[in-house]
């Protein structure tokens, strides 16, 4: 099997693995263990939450469609830019690392994990990966999306990457506002110590807290 064939097979497989292990199975597991729904993006905990939920859904459908088209048509037909093979393998490393981070962070969140902003009270998780960054799940997902863009670089994938960064940034700020209201000083102290997506970067300052 040559490298191009591997990439064409591996991309849709990675998309399926991500959807299965990062969304479907954790949702089913939470439902069985607690009786609670994991997918709450559609609920209006915030007026803007539903809009972001729709945009996230469109993005996931777009990644799935891109993966299928890439498997069927290959690089040339989709306008994928030629890059050295070592760079593409770095992209796969980012995808694999991101998937691991997402899964570990979900396990560490336990019953507090949701897709979206939950209306009910959830415990604040600050240990494990959450002691390094406040949003390890989103950080891992950003690694996955970055890896896909590196493996299949094109105008479409890098525009999608930029869109996803924007969506995640907006979603995280909604969640921060929610957590400040839910946990108050405890979350404020935590957010002042721990970075948003990278260690030490994006810590919540006094001005941000007041604005929220």
Image (tube, rainbow, N blue to C red):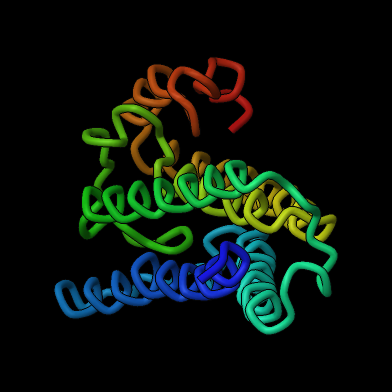
Q: Position of residue 13 (x, y in %)?
A: 47, 74
Q: Is residue 71 left or right of residue 93?
A: right
Q: How many marks?
A: 0
Q: Residue at x 22, y 35 (%)?
A: 128
**Near-viewer residue (139 or 44):** 139
Residue displayed at 67% across by 79% down: 65
Q: What percent of the width, then of the height, locates residue 129? A: 29, 36
Up-down relation of residue 139 to residue 121 (above or below):
above
Work out whether 2 lies above or below 117: below
* Above or below 80: residue 63: below
Residue extending farthest to the left is 33
Q: Quadrant of residue 79?
A: bottom right
- Residue in view at x 40 percent, y 23 percent: 194
Quarter of the picture holding the C terminus: top right
> Could you tell me residue 92's position as x and y percent?
50, 52
In the image: residue 119, left or right of residue 148: left
Q: Residue furthest bottom?
A: 72
From the viewer's perspective, is 136 left or right of 59? left
The answer to which of 186 and 6 lies nearer the viewer is: 6
Q: Where is residue 84 shown, x and y percent of the image? A: 68, 44
């Amino acid at each position: 099997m040559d490298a191009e064939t591997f990439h064409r097979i591996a991309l849709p497989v990675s998309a399926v693995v991500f959807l299965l292990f990062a969304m479907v199975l954790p949702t089913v597991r939470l439902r069985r263990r607690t009786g609670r729904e994991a997918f709450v993006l559609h609920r209006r905990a915030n007026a803007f939450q539903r809009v972001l939920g729709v945009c996230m859904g469109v993005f996931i459908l777009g990644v799935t469609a891109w993966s299928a088209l890439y498997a069927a048509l290959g690089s040339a037909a989709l306008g994928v830019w030629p890059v050295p093979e070592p760079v593409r393998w770095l992209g796969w490393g980012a995808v694999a690392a991101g998937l691991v981070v997402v899964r570990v962070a979900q396990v560490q969140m336990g019953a507090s994990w949701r897709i979206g902003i939950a209306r009910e009270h959830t415990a604040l998780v600050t240990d494990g990966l959450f002691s390094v960054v406040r949003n390890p799940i989103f950080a891992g997902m950003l690694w996955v999306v970055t890896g896909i863009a590196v493996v299949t670089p094109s105008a479409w994938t890098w525009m999608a990457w930029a869109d996803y960064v924007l969506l995640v940034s907006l979603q995280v700020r909604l969640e921060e506002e929610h957590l400040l209201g839910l946990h108050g000083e405890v979350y404020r102290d935590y957010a002042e110590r721990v970075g948003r997506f990278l260690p030490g970067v994006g810590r919540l300052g006094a001005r941000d807290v007041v604005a929220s």
